[in-house]
Image (cartoon, rainbow, N blue to C red):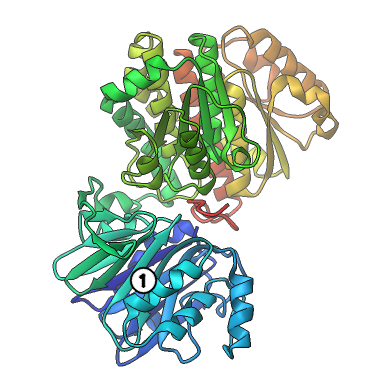
């Protein structure tokens, strides 16, 4: 979940590394550090977030270097535990994303052989192991060490006496950027966009030897060719564009991300796979899990397809019987739990489909087929436009199974999403920003929408929030309702409207204030709630989308009212690449 970046070429490395790490901060921001090769290795590390133009970092000399921004796994987030980590003599520096599972055993043996450790991290063992193997050939030393490592890693290694970087990956993402007389390496594409559109996605087991203007990739000790791919994202997509936060910018980009994903359509191979499936299992985590649950409700009720949704983190250890199509949903395409589940589905000979926003990511290489979302770069840690693009992809699958029944609704949905962005929800924000607990409730597909709304509220505002199926409140959570415990209820026309209205009245009878999301023109609902937020009275699928946007905005503006760091919520990282 950390971010790593490397550079070797004709530029001063430090500014390139620092800028790259700024664009990777959504992967971790507990601490950061860079190391460059001048007359020797120079290192700068610091706890906390990366400031613009940090003079201590920018002042490092050399045209080759590596950097790291951290989401702590081993050891507290402080300067000592920050990467890069070095060997005893300060001649080797390493940055690492992943977890070395056998580091305690390796560390004990290294200490017995006289090595001195400075940090609590698992990564430092790599530097000391390379120290023992290094005789002037960095590539050979790294190759000798990799078989000793158990777990996951993407590593970049430099030595003080050579202008080269050795990069290696296994179960953690690593991308090369190919420029003119310069080579880049990073956890994903975002740090590369300013400099090149040509990238190479390394595969598990690859080791790359990078020098100014050239690179060589090895696998199993043999030189291999990996295709150069052109990125269709641009550097401007990673800027805030005048918005105060990336999250708000990305909320406002949702009409476009939904439209682009729908417009891209589904190729014939994926279409055939979807049509032939007798049942579907979706595997996902976090926000992606909520989009999968929305699909389950819609697919079973509208198309009669049996759908099961599994949490990726549980799937590996409690694997259900698998039949039919397995769909892995992952924004980054690098979610460790989802990747493990996808591999298990492949081992059981199930047809597999990946839905992801990241071209060339691990899930795209494992799955039989891929359905790419068209959200573009998403920098804010809290998923918004990727959530919307996932819903677009899943609704397009639904539409295929229902013979195009929803063509019109989906082709115009982006207009309704745009309308919702203009709503005034200040009264709801004022209420939520003054309390410690908020409940979100809905029925049918609006139950997972409520769960997602609660997730957004808790992760960026730190207001405790829970999402429930509305009928479940009376089975225990009613005990928590007070005048200081607002409930956000999604209540739209349909078979559950009457029972939802009854649930709201039950909540009101416990004196809890109710914020209701309903359709414009509803006469009854505004009379029984404290605050009414109207969304367009459109098709059910579109109501799912617009209600979701309302809850995103509610969480965002509540977080701003409480002066939270919206784009970098505490303790979180965007891409969860460790179990």
Q: Residue 57, how many percent across, how many down?
A: 39, 80
Extreme residue toward the front, this view = 221
Where, by quadrant of the figure, is residue 455 drawn? top right
Give the number of callouts: 1
47 sits to left or right of 542? right
Residue at the spot x=52%, y=9% of the render?
Answer: 304
Q: Is residue 534 visible?
A: no
Q: Residue 498, how many percent across, how many down?
A: 67, 8
Q: Residue 473, how many percent across, how many down?
A: 77, 25
Helix, strand, or loop for circle 1?
helix
Given residues 140 and 401, the one toward you in this image is: 140
Q: Is residue 344 visible?
A: yes
Given residues 577 and 101, the one toward you in this image is: 101
How dense is the environment of label 1, judged by Cα within 10 Å: few (below 14), some, or many (20 and up)?
many
With respect to residue 374, does 514 lie above or below? above
Where, by quadrant of the figure, is residue 426 drawn? top right
227 sits to left or right of 561? left
472 sits to left or right of 68? right
With respect to residue 517, does 439 lie above or below? below
Residue at the spot x=52%, y=23% of the render?
Answer: 323
Q: Residue 31, how many percent across, how many down?
A: 52, 70
Extreme residue toward the right, this view = 479
Given residues 540 and 226, the one toward you in this image is: 226
Residue located beneath label 1 in the image: 18
């Amino acid at each position: 979940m950390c971010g790593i970046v490397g550079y070797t070429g004709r530029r001063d490395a430090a500014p390139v590394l620092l800028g790259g790490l700024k664009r990777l901060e959504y992967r971790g921001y507990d601490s950061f550090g860079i190391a460059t090769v001048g007359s020797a290795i120079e290192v700068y590390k610091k706890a906390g977030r990366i400031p613009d133009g940090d003079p201590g970092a920018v002042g490092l000399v050399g045209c080759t270097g590596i950097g790291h921004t951290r989401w702590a796994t081993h050891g507290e987030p402080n300067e000592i535990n920050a990467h890069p980590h070095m060997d005893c003599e300060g001649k080797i520096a390493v940055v690492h994303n992943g977890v070395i599972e056998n580091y305690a055993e390796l560390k004990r043996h290294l200490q017995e052989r006289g090595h001195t450790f400075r940090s609590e991290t698992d990564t430092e063992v790599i530097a000391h192991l390379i120290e023992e193997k290094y005789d002037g050939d960095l590539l050979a030393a790294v190759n000798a060490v990799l078989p000793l490592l158990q777990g996951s890693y993407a590593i970049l290694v430099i030595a003080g006496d050579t202008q080269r970087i050795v990069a290696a990956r296994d179960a953690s993402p690593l991308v090369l950027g190919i420029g003119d007389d310069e080579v880049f390496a990073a956890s994903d594409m975002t740090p590369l966009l300013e400099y090149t559109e040509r990238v190479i996605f390394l595969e598990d087991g690859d080791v790359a030897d990078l020098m100014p203007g050239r690179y060589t990739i090895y696998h199993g000790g043999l030189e291999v060719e990996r295709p150069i791919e052109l990125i269709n994202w641009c550097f401007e997509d990673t800027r805030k564009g005048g918005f105060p936060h990336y999250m708000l910018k990305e909320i406002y980009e949702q009409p476009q991300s939904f439209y682009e994903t729908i417009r891209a359509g589904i190729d014939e191979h994926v279409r055939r796979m979807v049509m032939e499936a007798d049942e579907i299992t979706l595997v996902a985590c976090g926000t992606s899990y909520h989009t999968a649950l929305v699909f389950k409700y819609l697919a079973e009720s509208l198309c009669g397809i049996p759908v099961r949704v599994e949490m990726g983190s549980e799937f590996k250890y409690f694997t259900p019987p698998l039949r039919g199509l397995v769909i892995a949903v992952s924004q980054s395409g690098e979610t460790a739990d989802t990747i493990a589940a996808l591999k298990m589905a492949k081992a059981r000979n199930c047809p597999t489909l990946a839905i992801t926003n990241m071209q060339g990511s691990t899930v795209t290489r494992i799955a039989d087929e891929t359905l790419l979302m068209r959200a573009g770069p998403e920098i804010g840690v809290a998923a918004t436009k990727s959530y919307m693009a996932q819903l677009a992809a899943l609704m397009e699958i639904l539409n295929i199974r229902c013979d195009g029944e929803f063509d019109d609704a989906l082709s115009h949905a982006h207009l309704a999403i745009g309308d919702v962005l203009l709503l005034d929800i200040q009264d709801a924000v004022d209420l939520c920003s003054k309390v410690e607990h908020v409940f979100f409730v809905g029925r049918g597909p609006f139950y997972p929408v409520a769960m997602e709304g609660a997730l957004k509220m808790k992760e960026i505002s730190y207001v405790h929030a829970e999402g429930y199926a509305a009928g479940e409140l009376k089975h225990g959570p009613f005990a928590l309702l007070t005048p200081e415990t607002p409930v956000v209820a999604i209540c739209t026309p349909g078979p559950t409207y009457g029972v939802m209205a009854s649930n709201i009245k039950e909540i009101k009878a416990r004196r809890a204030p109710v914020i209701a999301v309903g359709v414009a023109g509803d006469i009854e609902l505004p009379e029984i709630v404290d605050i009414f937020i109207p969304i367009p009275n459109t098709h059910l699928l579109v109501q799912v989308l617009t209600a979701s946007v309302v809850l995103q905005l509610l969480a965002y503006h509540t977080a701003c009212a409480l002066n939270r760091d919206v784009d970098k919520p505490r303790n979180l990282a965007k891409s969860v690449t460790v179990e």
